[in-house]
Image (cartoon, coloured by chain):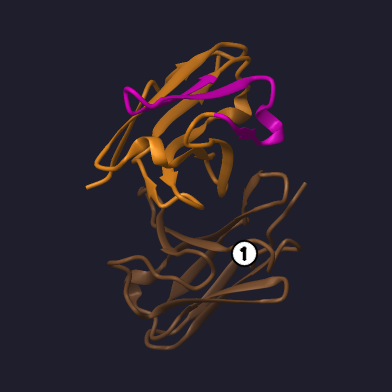
């Protein structure tokens, strides 16, 4: 079955840049989506179709994709960005999958 | 404003059944893919199932195939997940989500606990 691989954890100091990667063999034929989930809350879409940012999402969130890797970048990370981040995509059969999730610590 | 409200969660014994519902408003329901996604305690997000805007295509994660059925009623702006033969490992918060590609908007979730 199709899998997306993320690092379990990433740490960054406030104001620095955090990068979270997502590896998947279906990239770049399919899009990557990125979700932020804070404790006790529903997930929130922060990046769709590799690079697009929904309205209301701060400009410090950006996405990119190259080869079999998609990347979420948080430029100038804030304490409030501390959360779990998940990538998501689909395979050629129409099945969907989430990456295992990355816990972002900002301290 | 997009709103997705799940209902029907609760405690059920192993082998039992439960039906989750999701009431949608604030968008053209019949134009969107709908999904169910869950998060088990201590685990990450797991896609469970999704259904095309017209109901003509349905997809399931392997672990629920043959046990769960996703359906929608575009006239009532509602999504359902019929869950049969439930197992302890199905214990999770179940989220309803909508999107044109991937899930864009999410409900607050419904807790399903499978335990004797």
Viewer-side residue, A87 vs B26:
B26
Q: Position of residue A99 (x, y in %)?
A: 62, 57
- Residue closest to the far bottom: A16
Q: Quadrant of residue A29?
A: bottom right
Per the rendered image, the range of residues in magenta is: B56-82
Q: What residue is shown at x 72% (from left), y 50% (from top)?
A: A92
Q: Is residue A55 above or below residue B29?
A: below
Indicate the quadrant containing the C terminus of chain A: top left, top right, bottom left or bottom right: bottom left
Q: Is residue B7 above or below residue A32?
A: above
Left or right of A64 in this view: A38: left
Q: Is residue B100 above or below residue A49?
A: above
Q: What residue is shown at x 40% (from left), y 41% (from top)?
A: B31
Instruction: Based on the picture, tell me whether residue B25 belongs to the magenta stretch.
Output: no
Q: What residue is shown at x 40% (from left), y 68% (from top)?
A: A82
Q: Residues within 10 Å of mark 1 (few under 14, many from 20)?
A: some
Question: On the image, numbered disc 1 is attached to which residue?
Answer: A8
Instruction: Based on the picture, tell me whether residue B67 belongs to the magenta stretch.
Output: yes
- Secondary element type, mark 1: loop
Q: Which chain is orange?
A: B
Q: What residue is shown at x 62% (from left), y 64% (from top)?
A: A8
Q: Position of residue A63 (x, y in %)?
A: 51, 75
Q: Is residue B13 above or below residue A101?
A: above
Tell me which chain the residue with mark 1 is part of: A
Q: Which chain is brown?
A: A
Left or right of A82 in this view: B70: right
- Residue closest to the far left: B1
Q: Position of residue B64 (x, y in %)?
A: 66, 28
Q: Position of residue A103 (x, y in %)?
A: 52, 64
Q: How many marks?
A: 1
């Amino acid at each position: 079955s199709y899998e997306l691989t993320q690092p379990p954890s990433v740490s960054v100091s406030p104001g620095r840049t955090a990068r979270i990667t997502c590896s998947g063999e279906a990239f770049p034929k399919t899009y990557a989506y990125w979700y932020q989930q804070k404790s006790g809350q529903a997930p929130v879409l922060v990046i769709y179709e590799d690079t697009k940012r929904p309205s209301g999402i701060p400009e410090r969130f950006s996405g990119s994709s190259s080869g079999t890797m998609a990347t979420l970048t948080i430029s100038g990370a804030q304490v409030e960005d501390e959360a779990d981040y998940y990538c998501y995509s689909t395979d050629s059969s129409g099945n969907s999958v989430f990456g295992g999730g990355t816990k972002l610590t900002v301290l | 404003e997009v709103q997705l409200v799940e209902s029907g969660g609760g405690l059920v014994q192993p082998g039992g059944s439960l039906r989750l519902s999701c009431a949608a408003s604030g968008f053209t329901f019949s134009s969107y893919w709908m999904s169910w996604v869950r998060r088990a305690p201590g685990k990450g997000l797991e896609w469970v199932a999704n259904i095309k805007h017209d109901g003509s295509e349905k997809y399931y994660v392997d672990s629920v195939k043959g046990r769960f059925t996703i359906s929608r009623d575009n006239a009532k702006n509602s999504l359902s997940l019929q869950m049969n033969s439930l197992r302890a490992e199905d214990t999770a918060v179940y989220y309803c989500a909508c999107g044109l590609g991937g899930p864009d908007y999410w409900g607050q979730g419904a807790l399903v606990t499978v335990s004797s």
